Amino acid sequence: MASSTSSFVASSLVVHLLLVGTSSAHTLKTGFYSASCPNVFDVIKPIVKSAISGEKRLGASLLRLFFHDCFVNGCDASVLLDDTGNFIGEKTAGPNNNSIRGFNVVDKIKKKIEKACPGVVSCADILAIAARDSVVILGGPNWEVKLGRRDSRTASRSKANTDIPPPTSNLTRLIANFSSQGLSVKDMVALSGGHTIGQARCTSFRGHIYNDTNIDSSFAKTRQANCPKRTGSGDKNLAPLDLQTPTLFDNNYFKNLLNHKGLLHSDQELFNNGATDSQVKSYASSINTFFSDFVTAMIKMGDIKPLTGSKGEIRKNCRKIN
Ligand code: HEM
Ligand SMILES: *[C@@H]1O[C@H](CO)[C@@H](O)[C@H](O)[C@H]1NC(C)=O
Ligand SMILES: *[C@@H]1O[C@H](CO)[C@@H](O)[C@H](O)[C@H]1NC(C)=O
Ligand SMILES: *[C@@H]1O[C@H](CO)[C@@H](O)[C@H](O)[C@H]1NC(C)=O
Ligand SMILES: *[C@@H]1O[C@H](CO)[C@@H](O)[C@H](O)[C@H]1NC(C)=O
């Protein structure tokens, strides 16, 4: 009896050690491909660079793809799966439909990576690296990207609809939705600084420029000129999220908020006499503080529920499961 108890204790200790061992072996790490695909960064960066030199906005689009991937069941490249006759992906979810872009760049990267290291580098990791490279190329901070994510065999349009906050969100909702992902208020404000680059469609900011009061009136008028009031007219017309330097990763996004020149309702919520005002002010006055907090938050976002070990797969084509 005593001996069977102690052997049970001993064997469960072994199981426990094994579990701890595997779980730490399966956390993301920066050197994940250092033996299996040492050139991974040298393959990806030039492709991102040439895409951005062809069209600056693609850097913003790639950064956003990573965010929309990570917020829906974790950073697993689910956002990249195409809809087919019998598969509903995330590309047609409300926050994504006619909005997310950059897929051709990802395809280009995947093709080249498959030549260099066949079957080794996940699409989820490609998104993480391409997002970082985009930020760096557009003048933002650099960081070491943690790797080892694997690709999902599933996607969820419904979760994409509920887990990615809409631009009509108030501060309470932004905080709640980021908190569901394990991200703090501080992370949320820092990550919103991603809107220092890129564009939004009229349909995403119409309510803010016609109906809100916490907006500079001359800025609202300027934006109204290319975004008609009536739903359905000019819905796709674009405006820069950062009116000053939309292709430069800097802290002007936060300076704009101080002047009530945020483009989205959700942007201006971060500086609207609330709990996050002081953080916006701090980023507006110190680009270094913003960069440092942005990096911390990007790494945290990249850690959301990755598939590791033998979970998921390494897709051959980022648009479909193997
Ligand atoms: C805080 C909550 C957020 C909301 C409500 C939000 C909402 C939006 C909306 C509505 C657009 C414009 C889409 C369109 O009209 O087609 C947009 C664009 C963008 N978002 Fe966000 N976003 C948020 C957080 C983030 C985060 C965390 C990042 C990355 C760190 C990010 C990066 C971008 C970028 C770079 C663009 C421009 C994309 C392009 O030009 O292709 N956003 N966002
Ligand atoms: C996505 O947009 C297309 C074209 O605007 C539209 O026809 C389609 O119904 C939308 N898909 C969904 C799922 O809403
Ligand atoms: C914020 O938005 C949520 C739903 O999106 C709503 O339930 C709540 O009443 C709003 N809070 C405030 C203070 O407006
Ligand atoms: C996001 O916030 C809204 C409104 O507060 C809430 O209804 C929804 O469940 C939240 N989603 C997540 C994933 O936190
Ligand atoms: C502005 O608010 C009014 C009243 O709530 C609403 O009927 C109208 O559709 C809104 N307009 C825009 C452009 O959001």
Image (tube, rainbow, N blue to C red):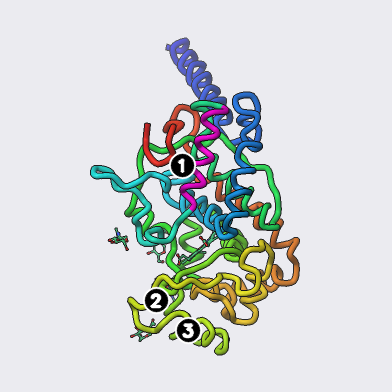
Cα distance between the residues tagged 2 and 3: 10 Å
Q: Quadrant of residue 270?
A: bottom right
Provide the secondary structure element on which disc 3 rests. Answer: helix
Disc 3 and disc 1 in contact, CB within 8 angstroms: no
Q: Nearer the viewer, residue 190 or 40?
A: 40
The amino acid type, in three-letter code, at marker 1 is: Asp
Q: Answer whether residue 109 is magenta in the image.
A: yes
Ligand 4: does it lie within 8 Å of the C-beta at label 1?
no
Magenta region, residue range: 102-116
Which residue lies at the image location 49% right of the left edge and 19% below the top edge? 9
Q: Please give the label number shown on residue 76.
A: 1
Instruction: Give SS at disc 1.
Output: loop
Q: In this picture, is 176 found above or below 28?
A: below
Q: Main secondary structure of the magenta part?
A: helix
For the residues marked 3 and 1, what is the alpha-carbon distance in whole angstroms?
38 Å
Task: Give the mark nearer the N terminus: 3 vs 1.
Answer: 1
Q: CA distance from mark 1 to mark 2?
A: 34 Å
Question: In the rendered image, which residue does mark 2 sit on?
Answer: 234
Nearest to the observer: residue 90 or residue 111: 111
List x then y, in percent, for residue 5: 45, 16
